[in-house]
Image (tube, coloured by chain):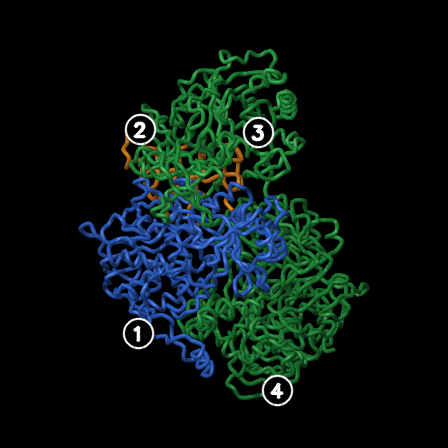
Chain colours: A orange, B blue, C green
């Protein structure tokens, strides 16, 4: 079971959070074309390795958190708020 | 139990040279009398050649089945199956062995029912006892809205030629005496059943297809991991592996939860996220449950293996992972739901827990499709429904490779559907892989 | 009698005798006995029949690694199958029965399987049972299923718990697993560090291997005393760690009841097991090592036991496992059993050792015990019990045949390492131990003692001490402890690897699954040569003992077949659970009615009082209809009341999200497809919310309560998903907006008052309010006092009638509901439930999640004109794709049977007569109508809008029904909304 160190609430069990996928994506600008939105909505790197992802602290502060987590070892490298600038871990694939 | 003709697939099994020898009771007797020293390897552990017409990446159920049908039904034997470890230890070796065609979308029903038809003849086809047991798959329902949904599915299935019946509480209790209809949080109000659904011995599927493919000339190459896809002039030319470069006219990716990893070698991003699905087996007990039972008020499902252990599972883990182990709170939920449905399970003990890595797609339906690189195709996106699809998935992927176009039954499983807005979303949860 | 209780054991109380039954025989035990020690004390050797061959089997070990002595228990708390006799404590009146034999243990007719044993080789079932095709399911499989399986489930008396077990959550700095010499020593060292320590021990007593050596009693007593006096140290016995998870989380099961069938415990409804979810910063794994089996012919006969078991039965229970045991071993440590028995007065038949000499052999000879050096046991005589063994030198020359009633085997030890592997550790092959030792990365913790390959109690104690120092320093702390004298370990010679002795007869590697060395060699011949393939093909290591005594042995046999060393073959990946774990322990208290929480409307008590029948809707209990009578009559009665007079309904489960901030309007413009920033204060508007892929996520009525204040509603089913969606859009995509979202669903009760007399009814409870259409126009949203309670008033309608909704704080719900009912009574108003509401809204053509099924777009539902032309919103781009707007998609329509006597069924499929198997769409909702004769329904139909006016068939093959229907617009009832706007 994952334990996530929420910046607001401290280290909490995984069950308090809900996962929401790839945090490395940015919603395309309003003027962007369909292909950009298709990529944003459907296409994923889904890495076997370090993953930059969203976790929503549903049973706590209800804030979205950025997390760098390894999808094989589940080691968590960093957790931050939406505004935080997190340094990717060594070996993370560049987007 | 035979279905109305859903699989008019001609077979070439009669004139086959069998390196491992034919399997039969007589053969077993003969070998028993000579100390079992006459058995030969079930499949050749081949050395890789310089190039093949078709290279299939992935020695799991779909990869081996694709190779089998290519060689035995489409006449293409210049095929290699590359597996990074020993064959059949991925999802095909980790699932809960259920076969069924209980789907909502008519195009999915037809595909999975075609698979069911192939399961029904598989043992004869492969001369390998896969213990296909069509004992019935039962779904409970707990409120009218759910019942309406299931009525629709039953009708979709019947219209597409599959079988589905309704069971009232009395019939359900008669079929499953240990079921608790009223003691739980969600009383069971009724059920639906597909009589032709059931279970299959999963290891036998991988080994049986491997044997059949190998005997027809396919090279099965274990301990050979693909590390790169080579391309030139806009088409794939072969695969880099831990055992050297292997040239290929067509490369087929059949790697389930690792689809993104392989496709990424050609800079292709798939609409897939990889999630763990846990499965469990209990100690073995005398016959307790004769059907496959799915709990409508949760994600729990259970059946009993022929060895006596209860085989069961629940929901997928919510975060993506390649770790092949599950998170602990799901196990608690599975146990609680099990006890709610079958209270006698309370003091039964769980022996083992494991998980597979599921290729969850953005609409919950599979992908059997050409990829945006000439010569590259994929069989994947199975979510947690890949095992039951192995025969049909293998056959239709072989068709795609051999004929260069989708089999009619898998036309809706193309990759382009996402961009074009033709998603095939059974539950309607949208582009969130963990929600399917 | 061949085995007896010859002395006082550590755990047994000679002054307390307990009576119990085994297979109908009355036997005596002492308090503290396990079923196995009691059976041995009574001279019972035959305790079961093997799974496949039904060979007679006895007790093999003294602990949870037991492969053969599996029993069923019938006690006060019901029937418990498949328990290990070696770990179950005897309690008064317990009835124990052996398994897997018919009609009795002595005369088991299925032993005839033994005659066909050659046919039942590894994987035999894959090669046969294929013809005739029908026979597998009708003949072979039922027979196999009946023969398989050990215990039986569901036998009366009912063992299902009335109250649940418990789940407790623990937090600690260091989790120490195992309280042997290494674990206790480490704990002692860490006591001064200030760290919180949690020690868990699966045994009934702490001490591990020190319990078996009297020289260690003083050390153990002193150490346990010190630990008990340290406040930050907790010691739990009978607590088995069952799995290691991520991030330092471990699951453990604590057995609470003193015996598996403790009547008093059960009667009080106390938990029998406790699941402990332990969160630890570091783990110190001191789980010890299991003694290994040797594969020699017929090594499964009752009386063949693990060498260490003899020591355990003697020390713990005072029982001698044989009158003249023979020890067959390749290592010095196993000799301790012989020495202990010898000292207790038991005559040792001989010690057989393949090594030419050793320290232990010299000590044995000095004690007058016969030692056959350079020799092996080549045959075991006896069927129901060991009678004699044949000994030969390692080169094959026969040496002796010895009468004996007990053969003790030890091939060495194998670390109990599964938890280490699960916790991210690794195994290293130790040539000197001929086994694997475990290690953990420093960031996780440390493995110590026998599990790390340090054998001997003193060596383990010193290793535990050193490990503790390392662990503490890894956490930046120091740990000091006074040195304490340790008894010396005897000098040991090295072992000599011995896996198999060839000969006539089956050499078992997995006793529970009847797997032999020949099976493994056959697996290799057939290409199932990888350890995981061999395991699955032969089922070696897959039984309830998980290969504890035979796992490594099997790997070594496979390695020999491959011409490799065991280190190249490896071991299968160990999976949770370390020991079989009951469903009940994992389920905890969440059983029966407590599987999920129940959400109730604020006015739930009132609904009960009104005679409501409830329907589970997700976690909610919603009033379905206010009647105990089933069928349509009461539902239609309520619906008619709404159409003709008035009805009062409860809509409290709909999601309510408070949206406040300077940019509240702009935010709603972004998340809704239509516009909300232009909504006037005091007005409500229907909105549709899309997912980014262009499909409808949800719909609802959102009101503007102030310049910067909106109240957004969601459907009941999608409430959680919508809240998360909104938070995501706000925090991640529109962090530029000044908005705060608050979920107020549970804060407000919301009632609907609908019908031609709704205004009149409402006026009664709002006597001072101006409810005219001028003051409260259609789609108004205003603060108000209802029955004296401050709340809000909305004029919105789902039913198609003049209607209002009132929102009041939840604690006023019952009072306001009662006031509304009272006000409605003289008018003939009725409360109406979800079913009646459904009838009304279907007539009006409003959608619910039956139509909003996650695959519908705005175009499908006829909402395309709601998509705002200017400005970005979620889903805008992908909603425009041809695939999302195509008219071939299923579109919302209504339908009616052309024969008004025919019924509709939700889930009917729509087809054209000319193509009866082509699925054009389906009936999503339907109801008998209160407006027109017969049934009406809504449907999603391909190219639906163009088919309006045409006739199709609605079919239900499930029911064998087929109904001709006419397709109409969903808005056939009062399309001008005159009733709503009254």
- The residue that mark 1 highlights is B15
Which residue lies under the disc numbered 3?
A: C746
Give the camera-side residue of B201 and C563: B201
Q: Residue furthest right?
A: C15
- Look at the numbered disc 3 and give the secondary structure of its residue: loop
- Labels 4 and 2 touching (C-beta < 8 A): no
Report the mark closest to the observer, 2 or 1.
Answer: 1
Picture layout, residue C50 above or below residue B139: below
Which element type, helix, strand or loop, lies under badge 2? loop
* Distance of label 3 from label 2 (alpha carbons): 36 Å
Disc 4 from disc 2: Cα separation:
91 Å
**Decide: marks 1, 3 in contact (CB < 8 A)?**
no
Q: Secondary structure at mark 4?
A: strand
Left or right of C911 in this view: A63: right
Circle 2 is placed at which residue position?
Answer: A30
Which of the two residues, C325 or C827, is positioned nearer the viewer here?
A: C827
Residue C762 lies in quadrant: top right
Write down the chain letter for disc 4: C
Q: Chain of mark 1?
A: B
User: Could you confirm whether marks 2 and 1 are on the same chain?
Assistant: no
């Amino acid at each position: 079971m994952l334990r996530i160190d929420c910046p607001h609430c401290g280290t909490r069990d995984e069950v308090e959070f809900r996962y929401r996928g790839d945090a490395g994506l940015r919603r395309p600008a309003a003027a962007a074309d369909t292909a950009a939105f298709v990529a944003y909505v459907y296409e994923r790197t889904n890495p076997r390795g370090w993953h930059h992802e969203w976790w929503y602290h549903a049973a706590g502060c209800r804030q979205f958190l950025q997390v760098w987590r390894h999808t094989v070892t589940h080691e968590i490298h960093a957790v931050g708020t939406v505004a935080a600038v997190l340094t990717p871990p060594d070996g993370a694939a560049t987007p | 139990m035979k279905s109305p003709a859903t699989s008019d697939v001609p077979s070439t099994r009669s004139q086959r040279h069998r390196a491992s020898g034919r399997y039969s009771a007589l053969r077993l007797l003969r070998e028993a009398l000579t100390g079992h020293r006459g058995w030969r390897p079930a499949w050749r552990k081949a050395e890789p050649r310089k190039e093949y017409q078709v290279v299939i990446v992935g020695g799991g159920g779909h990869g081996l089945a694709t190779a089998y049908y290519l060689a035995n039904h489409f006449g293409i034997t210049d095929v290699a199956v590359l597996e990074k470890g020993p064959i059949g230890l991925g999802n095909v070796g980790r699932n809960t062995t259920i076969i069924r065609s209980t789907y909502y979308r008519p195009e999915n029903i037809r595909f999975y029912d075609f698979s069911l038809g192939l399961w029904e003849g598989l043992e004869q086809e492969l001369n390998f006892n896969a213990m296909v047991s069509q004992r019935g798959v039962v779904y409970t329902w707990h409120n009218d809205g759910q019942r309406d949904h299931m009525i629709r599915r039953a009708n979709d299935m019947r219209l597409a030629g599959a079988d589905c019946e309704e069971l009232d509480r009395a019939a359900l209790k008669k079929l499953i005496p240990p079921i608790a209809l009223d003691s739980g949080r969600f009383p069971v109000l009724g059920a639906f059943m597909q009589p032709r659904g059931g279970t299959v011995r999963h290891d036998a599927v991988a080994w049986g297809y491997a044997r059949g493919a190998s005997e027809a000339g396919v090279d099965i190459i274990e301990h050979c991991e693909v590390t790169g896809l080579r391309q030139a002039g806009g088409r794939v030319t072969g695969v880099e592996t831990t055992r050297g470069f292997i040239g290929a006219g067509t490369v087929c990716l059949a790697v389930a939860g690792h689809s993104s990893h392989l496709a990424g070698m050609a800079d292709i991003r798939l609409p897939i996220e990889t999630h763990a699905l846990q499965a469990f087996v209990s100690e073995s007990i005398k016959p307790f449950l004769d059907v496959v039972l799915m709990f409508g008020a949760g994600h729990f499902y259970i059946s009993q293996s022929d060895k006596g252990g209860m085989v069961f599972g629940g929901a997928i883990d919510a975060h993506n992972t390649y770790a092949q182990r599950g998170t602990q709170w799901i196990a608690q939920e599975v146990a609680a739901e099990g006890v709610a449905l079958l209270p006698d399970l309370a003091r039964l003990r769980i022996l083992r827990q494991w998980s597979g890595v599921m290729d969850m797609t953005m609409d919950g339906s599979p992908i059997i499709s050409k990829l945006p690189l000439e010569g590259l195709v994929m069989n994947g996106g199975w979510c947690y429904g890949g095992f039951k699809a192995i025969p049909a998935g293998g056959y239709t992927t072989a068709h795609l490779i051999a004929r260069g176009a989708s089999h009619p039954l898998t036309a809706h499983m193309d990759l382009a559907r996402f961009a074009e807005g033709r998603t095939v979303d059974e539950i309607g949860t949208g582009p969130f892989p963990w929600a399917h | 009698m061949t085995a007896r209780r010859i002395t006082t054991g550590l755990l047994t109380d000679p002054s307390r005798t307990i009576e119990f039954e085994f297979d109908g025989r009355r036997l005596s035990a002492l308090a503290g006995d396990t079923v196995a020690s009691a059976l041995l004390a009574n001279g019972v050797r035959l305790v079961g029949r093997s799974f496949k061959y039904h060979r007679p089997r006895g007790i093999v070990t003294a602990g949870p690694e037991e492969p053969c002595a599996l029993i069923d228990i019938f006690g006060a708390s019901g029937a418990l199958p498949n328990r290990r006799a070696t770990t179950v404590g005897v309690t008064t009146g317990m009835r124990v029965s052996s398994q897997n034999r018919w009609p009795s243990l002595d005369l088991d007719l299925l032993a005839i399987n033994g005659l066909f044993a050659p046919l039942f080789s590894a994987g035999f079932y894959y090669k046969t049972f294929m013809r005739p095709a029908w026979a597998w399911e009708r003949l072979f499989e039922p027979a196999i299923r009946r023969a398989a399986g050990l215990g039986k489930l569901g036998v009366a008396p009912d063992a299902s718990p009335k109250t649940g077990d418990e789940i407790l959550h623990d937090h600690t700095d260091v989790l120490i697993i195992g309280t042997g010499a290494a674990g206790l020593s480490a704990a002692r060292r860490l006591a001064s560090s200030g760290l919180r320590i949690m020690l868990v021990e699966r045994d009934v007593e702490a001490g591990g291997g020190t319990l078996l050596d009297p020289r260690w009693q003083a050390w153990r007593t002193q150490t346990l005393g010190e630990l008990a006096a340290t406040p930050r140290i907790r010691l739990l016995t009978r607590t088995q760690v069952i799995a290691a998870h991520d991030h330092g989380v471990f699951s453990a099961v604590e057995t609470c009841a003193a015996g598996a069938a403790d009547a008093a415990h059960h009667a009080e409804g106390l938990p029998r097991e406790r699941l402990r979810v332990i969160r630890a910063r570091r783990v110190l794994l001191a789980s010890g090592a299991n003694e290994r089996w040797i594969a020699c012919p017929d090594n499964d006969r009752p009386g063949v036991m693990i060498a260490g078991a003899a020591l355990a039965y003697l020390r713990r229970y005072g029982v001698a496992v044989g009158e003249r045991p023979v020890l067959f071993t390749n290592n010095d440590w196993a000799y301790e059993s012989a020495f202990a028995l010898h000292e207790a007065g038991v005559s040792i038949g001989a010690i057989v050792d393949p090594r030419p000499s050793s320290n232990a052999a010299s000590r044995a000879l000095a004690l007058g015990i016969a030692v056959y050096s350079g020799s092996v046991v080549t045959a075991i005589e006896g069927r129901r019990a060991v009678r004699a063994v044949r000994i030969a030198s390692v080169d094959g020359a026969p040496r002796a045949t010895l009468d004996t009633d007990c053969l003790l085997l030890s091939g060495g030890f194998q670390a109990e390492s599964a938890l280490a592997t699960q916790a991210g550790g690794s195994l290293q092959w130790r040539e000197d131990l001929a086994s694997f030792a475990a290690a953990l990365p420093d960031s996780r913790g440390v493995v110590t003692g026998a599990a790390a390959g340090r054998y001997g109690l003193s060596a383990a104690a010193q290793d535990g001490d050193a490990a503790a120092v390392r662990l503490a320093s890894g956490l930046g702390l120091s740990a000091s402890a006074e040195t304490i004298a340790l008894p010396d370990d005897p000098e040991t010679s090295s072992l000599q690897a011995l896996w198999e002795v060839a000969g006539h007869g089956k050499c078992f590697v997995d006793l529970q699954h009847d797997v032999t060395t020949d099976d493994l060699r056959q697996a290799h011949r057939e290409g199932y040569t990888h350890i995981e393939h061999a395991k699955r093909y032969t089922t070696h290591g897959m039984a309830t003992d998980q290969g504890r005594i035979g796992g490594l042995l099997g790997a070594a046999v496979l390695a020999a077949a491959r011409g490799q060393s065991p280190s190249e073959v490896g071991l299968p990946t160990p999976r949770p659970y370390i020991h079989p774990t009951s469903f009940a322990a994992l389920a905890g208290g969440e059983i029966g009615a407590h599987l999920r929480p129940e959400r109730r409307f604020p006015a739930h008590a009132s609904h009960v009082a009104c005679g409501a029948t409830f329907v589970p809707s997700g976690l909610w209990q919603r009033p379905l209809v206010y009647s105990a009578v089933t069928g349509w009559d009461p539902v239609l009665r309520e619906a008619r009341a709404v159409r003709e007079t008035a009805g009062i309904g409860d809509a409290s489960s709909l999601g309510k999200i408070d949206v406040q901030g300077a940019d509240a309007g702009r935010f709603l413009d972004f998340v809704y497809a239509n516009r909300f920033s232009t909504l006037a204060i005091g007005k409500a508007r229907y909105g549709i919310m899309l997912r980014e892929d262009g499909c409808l996520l949800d719909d609802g009525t959102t009101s503007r309560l102030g310049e910067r204040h909106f109240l957004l509603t969601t459907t009941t089913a999608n409430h959680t998903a919508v809240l998360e969606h909104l938070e995501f859009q706000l925090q991640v995509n529109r962090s530029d907006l000044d908005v705060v979202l608050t979920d107020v669903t549970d804060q407000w009760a919301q009632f609907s008052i609908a019908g031609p007399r709704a205004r009149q009814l409402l006026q009664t409870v709002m006597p001072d309010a101006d409810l005219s259409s001028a003051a409260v126009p259609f789609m108004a949203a205003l603060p108000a006092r209802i029955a004296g309670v401050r709340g809000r008033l909305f004029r919105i309608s789902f039913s198609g009638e003049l209607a209002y909704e009132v929102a009041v704080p939840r604690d006023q719900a019952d009072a306001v509901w009662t006031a509304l009912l009272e006000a409605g009574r003289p008018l003939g108003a009725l409360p109406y439930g979800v079913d009646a509401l459904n009838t009304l809204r279907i007539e009006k053509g409003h959608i619910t999640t039956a139509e909003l099924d996650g695959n519908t777009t705005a175009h499908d539902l006829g909402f395309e004109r709601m998509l705002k032309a200017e400005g970005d919103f979620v889903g805008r781009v992908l909603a425009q794709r041809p695939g999302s707007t195509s008219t071939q998609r299923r579109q919302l329509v209504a339908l009616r049977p052309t024969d008004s006597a025919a019924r509709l069924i939700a889930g009917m499929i729509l087809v054209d007569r000319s193509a009866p198997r082509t699925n054009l769409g389906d009936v999503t909702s339907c109801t008998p109508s209160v407006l027109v004769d017969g049934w009406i329904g809504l449907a999603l139909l391909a190219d639906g809008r163009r088919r309006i006016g045409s006739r199709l068939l609605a079919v239900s093959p499930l029911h064998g029904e087929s109904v001709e229907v006419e397709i109409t617009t969903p808005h056939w009832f009062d399309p001008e909304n005159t009733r709503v706007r009254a």
